[in-house]
Amino acid sequence: MMNEFSLNYEEMIWEDAIGYPSGTKIKMLKEENSKKTFLLKLPGGFRMDAHSHTAVSEQHFVLEGSYGGDGKTYRKGSYRFISRGTTHGPFTCDEGATILVIWDT
């Protein structure tokens, strides 16, 4: 179990997001088994197929830009909760976006 900690994400380096389309970047803020909190930077032209997570629910909070998914557009300030096992996507991002993503059980 993790106790309190803090960091400044602006001091972190964007890394390639493994398992995501080319050009997608990530800053991992917290990782504890399957639970993760990270920033995801989607490039313009981003496309990702529909998928589901069997072990975690997923939350999105759009910090910059916008992305499309499941027939809707999620703009800056949008929050989205996706229950475990729910298929979501496909996703598209024409102009680019930065999203706070939380995977939790």
Image: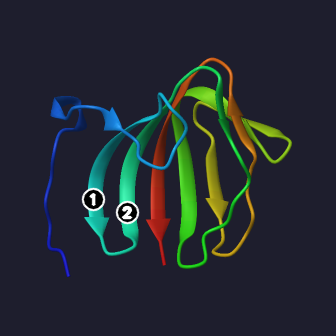
Crowding around mark 2 (Cα neighbors within 10 Å: few <14, some 14 to 19, many 20+) is some
Q: Amino acid at mark 2?
A: Lys
On the image, the x and y values in percent for residue 87 come to: 75, 64
Say which quadrant the N terminus sits in: bottom left
Q: Which mark is residue 36?
A: 2
Mark closer to the chain start, 2 or 1: 1
Distance from Cα at disc 2 to Cα at disc 1? 6 Å
Q: Amino acid at mark 1?
A: Lys
Toward the bottom, the furthest residue is 1
Mark 2 touching mark 1, by CB under 8 A?
Answer: yes
Residue occupied by mark 1: 30
What is the secondary structure assignment of the residue under circle 2?
A: strand
What is the secondary structure assignment of the residue under circle 1?
A: strand
Q: Indicate whether 41 appears above or below 49.
A: above
On the image, the x and y values in percent for residue 37 come to: 37, 57
Across the whole image, how many numbered discs are drawn on residues?
2
On the image, the x and y values in percent for residue 2 come to: 18, 75
Q: Which mark is residue 80?
A: none
On the image, the x and y values in percent for residue 43 come to: 53, 24
Is 104 displayed left or right of 81 in the figure?
Answer: left
